[in-house]
Image (cartoon, helix red, strand yellow):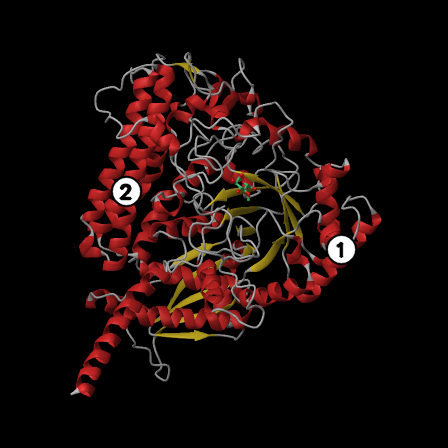
Amino acid sequence: MKSIFFRKWYFWMCVLSTYFSLYAQKDYKLWLQYTPITNPETVANYWENVQNVISTENSETLNIARSELKEGLKSMLGDHFDISKKADNIIVLGSFKSLNEKMKNQLKYDFDKIKKDGFIIKTLIEKDLKTTVITAKNDIGVLYGVFNFLRLIQTNKSIEKLNIIDSPKTDIRILNHWDNLDGTVERGYAGSSIWNWQKLPEFIDQRYIDYARANASIGINGTVLNNVNANALILTPHYIEKVAALADTFRSYGIKVYLTARFSAPIEIGGLKTADPSNPEVIKWWKEKANELYKAIPDFGGFVVKANSEGQPGPQNYGKNHVDGANMLADVLAPHGGIVMWRAFVYSEHDANDRAKQAYSEFVPYDGKFKENVLVQVKNGPIDFQPREPFHPMFGAMTKTPLMIEFQITQEYLGFSTHLVFLPKLYEEVLQSDTFSEGKGATVAKIVSGKINDHVLSGMAGVANIGSDLNWCGHPFAQANWYGFGRLAWNPDLSADSIANEWLRMTFSNEENFVKPIQKLMLQSRETVVNYMTPLGLHHIMATNHHYGPGPWVSNLSRPEWNPTYYHKADANGIGFDRSDTGSRATAQYFPEIAKQFNDIKKCPETYLLWFHHLPWDYELKNGKTLWNGLALQYQQGVNEVHDMQATWNRMQAYVDETRFKEVQMLLKIQYEEAKWWRDACLLYFQQFSKKTLPDGVEKAAHNLNYYQSLQFPFAPGI
Ligand code: GCV
């Protein structure tokens, strides 16, 4: 009796655990779901073209490419491969040099068009024999080609007659992990760091491989493992060994490892008295460190450095400048082929000037002075990853220096991982901004891809949103931001629209009734968050330190530019930061065409109005409403839009597995509550100055201002 009961219990436990692990896997599998195609006709059509896979050579990367292709096809189309059978329609995988002469002849013109890491996917037809060739200049290009090919099937595209020739437009497509050695992640909202330093180097977590594979699938080719607020210990032998184990794991996926170098490391771990970049002992120490690193990791990528920024040490501590610091490190890395990514995120509490102007003022005079293997890494906007900022004026202003763009994928100022915000829309807005640095058409995208000034190096960095959470990113839709960053790093001219479309199809479903409304929701989501957090160009009004929730009233922090009041400048006369010619003149840092536009209240896009202008509460907006009414209505609109997002999602149950459906549903509920919190707290606070009533259509706050001001979140994640 007992044993029957036990067997039944055991049976159901197995069923349940399979059920849970299957669904849990969906969260974990990101956009590489390879969901089985259920329509037999579609399956048959695909099979017509992919009866077998043959590779022309072996290497670790090519073996990965082959098994990815086979497994992907098997999962989507069913297990029909018969390697022993001579198939008519095959896929040939291999680097160009390994193809037979006939194929080489057919492909040689295409081959000339691809660059390093690029690939060709081409259907060659001879009599009745159809061969799809996936080839490239190097093995990793073939792997990229395979992921591209699989994406076609994942997104329901035809593979009948392919002619795809694609190359990345940037060289360095890199994630910046702000991961600390103690396992915490600065601005991380998806659990703890995925690097298990204690178990490395012996223990290689399967997650590292899955991480590398996911990155390779979107073309990411580099990772900075540690926080830009760095601990020098990462450069000690104890950690280098662990870093090397990760580099070994990532290598066959085309991913190079980089580290943040703490500028004062020669003192902290080298026993020197100084870190002065001109000191011979310091230079010798860094040279030896570079030798040690390259001995352990022959393809080590190089260093990222946050110097003289937010309390981090740097060359200015010794009366030297950014060029002195960056070039010293560049010199020690150059013999090994390494690079330096020197961050331009600097602002000083001793500089009374507008914070938005400081990086430009400090860096632009150094243009042309950096060594060839230095890139200056510039955040997308001049303040700090706000829901909306104009593009950074440094883009276009340093023609002799390769500038990398740094985007934040993790949602520090964008509702953490509880808010659904599709960031490629933000990235696209910045990348497609015209700097006018070389006349019309000098977009940020062209500058960062090195096209405008013919730079040898180019790159895009994204602050990772990856953590130990089952779904990697803390929100099923936050995965789209990792995905979208990778796709844009590969091609900064891709549209957010197409990225959302392919991501949805790969991650959830190809059903049009699902894709259409959810794509629309994603594309609107960034504007929505701007509406309920920082409409009309407001910025940096988040609560102190953790940046969770609203805090426009904060004015007591030691550094003026850390206080939200510094940014909105609300008073009885109005609101906004005057950065025009009558104010800080930050507009003058842009090229004249843009400067003129931003400077003139009538021409300035209303999305940036309060970023550049301080305006009276009665100022008339383009829609005829007063500034106060327009502001209040925009906050309300943000709330309404989240409500609409909920309604749209609720109609999607039939297309999404239960786990992810519920996760998103619960998260949207939090987002809705928090959108209302933002609206109420901000409007109550600003109302003290405007002294105006709320316009019709704006809901009254649920609490008074004191209540919102009293909220404390000492354990908010990410700090
Ligand atoms: C890693 C902002 C963030 C900091 C971050 C810094 C930077 O100030 O709040 O957490 O530090 O940017 O990008 O260096």
Q: Quadrant of residue 70?
A: bottom left
Question: Which of the pair 303/60 is nearer the observer?
Answer: 303
Query: Does residue 287 appear to the left or right of 462 in the view shown?
Result: right
Where is residue 126 drawn, in percent x and y? 38, 69
Where is residue 18 drawn, in percent x and y? 27, 72
Quadrant of the drawing holding the N terminus: bottom left
Where is residue 15 drawn, in percent x and y? 23, 74
State yes or no: Cβ of the residue under disc 2 lies below 8 Å from any atom of ligand 1: no
Q: Is residue 367 above or below residue 27?
A: above
In front of the other: label 1 or label 2?
1
Instruction: Provide the secondary structure element on which disc 2 rests.
Output: helix
Which residue lies most toward the right here?
280
| Residue at x 64%, y 66% (from the top left corner) | 241
The amino acid type, in three-letter code, at marker 1 is Gly
Identify the residue position indicated by label 1 in the image: 270
Query: Does residue 183 appear to the left or right of 155 in the view shown?
Result: right
Q: Does residue 657 appear in this view?
A: no
Where is residue 286 drawn, in percent x and y? 75, 53
Q: Is residue 8 above or below residue 674?
A: below
Kindly indicate whether the residue at mark 2 contacts the one at mark 1 (C-beta within 8 angstroms): no
Question: Which of the pair 329/354 is nearer the observer?
Answer: 354
The amino acid type, in three-letter code, at marker 2 is Leu
| Residue at x 42%, y 26% (from the top left corner) | 537
Instruction: Provide the secondary structure element on which disc 1 rests.
Output: loop
Question: Residue 521 shows which numbered tag?
Answer: 2
Question: Which of the pair 113/633 is nearer the observer?
Answer: 633
Q: Is residue 307 above or below residue 144?
A: above
Q: Does residue 72 appear in this view?
A: yes
